[in-house]
Image (cartoon, rainbow, N blue to C red):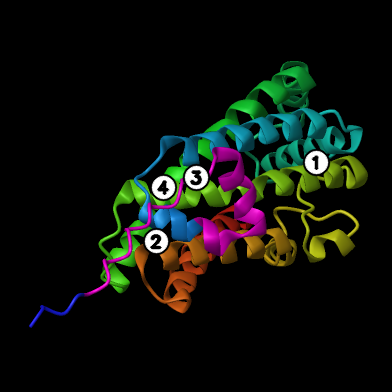
Amino acid sequence: MDAPSFPPPPPESDPPEPSSLVDRLTNVITAPGELFEEIKRSPVRTSNWLVPLILVCLGGIFYVFMAFSQPGVLRSMEDAREKAMEKQVAAGKLTQAQADQASAMTARIMTPGLLRIFGVGGAICASVGGLFLMAVAIWLGLKIFAGSKLDYMKAVEVCGLALVIDVPQKIARTWLVTWKENMFVTVSPTLFIANPDMHNRTDVLLSMFDLIDFWWLAVLSLGLSKVASVRYRTAALITFGVWYGFRILTGLLTTLQ
């Protein structure tokens, strides 16, 4: 009797072609679930975090130049310096003459051009440091609370890709600062405050309800849940917890000044 014949096994399908960098960057906004499934299967690509970081730095530079071109922004900074001097005089740490001299000297030194230089440096440092510190905090949170074995650079890659959402945020904030002439206005209830103040606790609290921040954190949580193979709720609790823990701490330190 002839041995039974079996149909030949189907040929193994080739692995899907990796998407282009442009597709990956746009998919952060249009198809984040599909994007992060691909990221999970792929080795770490430096371009996935470096290019978004460069775009965000460029957006930050543009924002700084626009912000320090607004008379209202420059005037509010001058008012803040004067209030600080008044407190020093009231506390007996300076005489009125010394305060006037210090104010005049500061006004001569802190020109709009110098403010732009400091602002650009601060924006770049904040973007670069923020990416890697956020990745460290999330990586540790996933390791401690979810038992994840996610590689640190994979966390950097996911955080970097999610930074794409910071580009439209920079565009929105640039438009807002030219409209309201206030650097503290975001896509939050601060829109409805005439002149929000970063030293006012209520204004600081309201600024935390930024709709674009919610969008960014939701996409970042999705990416981490896919790549680290943890539940979305767990990833979201860690991601939102890290971000809002930082925001609350810095808000308290700011309002204590």
Label 1 SS = helix
The quadrant where residue 30 appears: bottom right
**Residue 208 vs residue 143, the one in the foreground:** 143
- Residue in the image at 27% along x and 71% along y: 7
Which mark's residue is nearer the viewer, 3 or 2?
Answer: 2
Q: Is residue 157 visible?
A: yes
Which mark's residue is nearer the viewer, 1 or 2?
Answer: 2
Label 4 SS = helix
Q: Label 4: which residue? A: 156
- Residue in the image at 32% along x and 64% along y: 10
Earlier-in-chain disc, 1 versus 3: 3
Which mark's residue is nearer the viewer, 2 or 4?
Answer: 2
**Residue 94 vs residue 195, the one in the foreground:** 195
Kindly report the distance in space between the C-alpha atoms of the residues bearing marks 1 and 2. Answer: 33 Å
**Residue 14 vs residue 59, the one in the foreground:** 14
| Mark number displayed over residue 174 | 1
Write down the region rendered in magenta. Answer: 6-35
Q: Label 3: which residue? A: 130
Q: Position of residue 177 (x, y in %)?
A: 84, 43
Verify CB contact (< 8 Å) between mark 1 and mark 2. Answer: no
Label 2 SS = helix
- Residue in the image at 64% along x and 27% along y: 120
- Of all residues, the one furthest to the left in this rendering is 1
Earlier-in-chain disc, 2 versus 4: 4
Earlier-in-chain disc, 3 versus 2: 3
Verify CB contact (< 8 Å) between mark 3 and mark 2. Answer: no
Q: Label 2: which residue? A: 227
Circle 1: residue type: Thr
The quadrant where residue 144 appears: bottom left
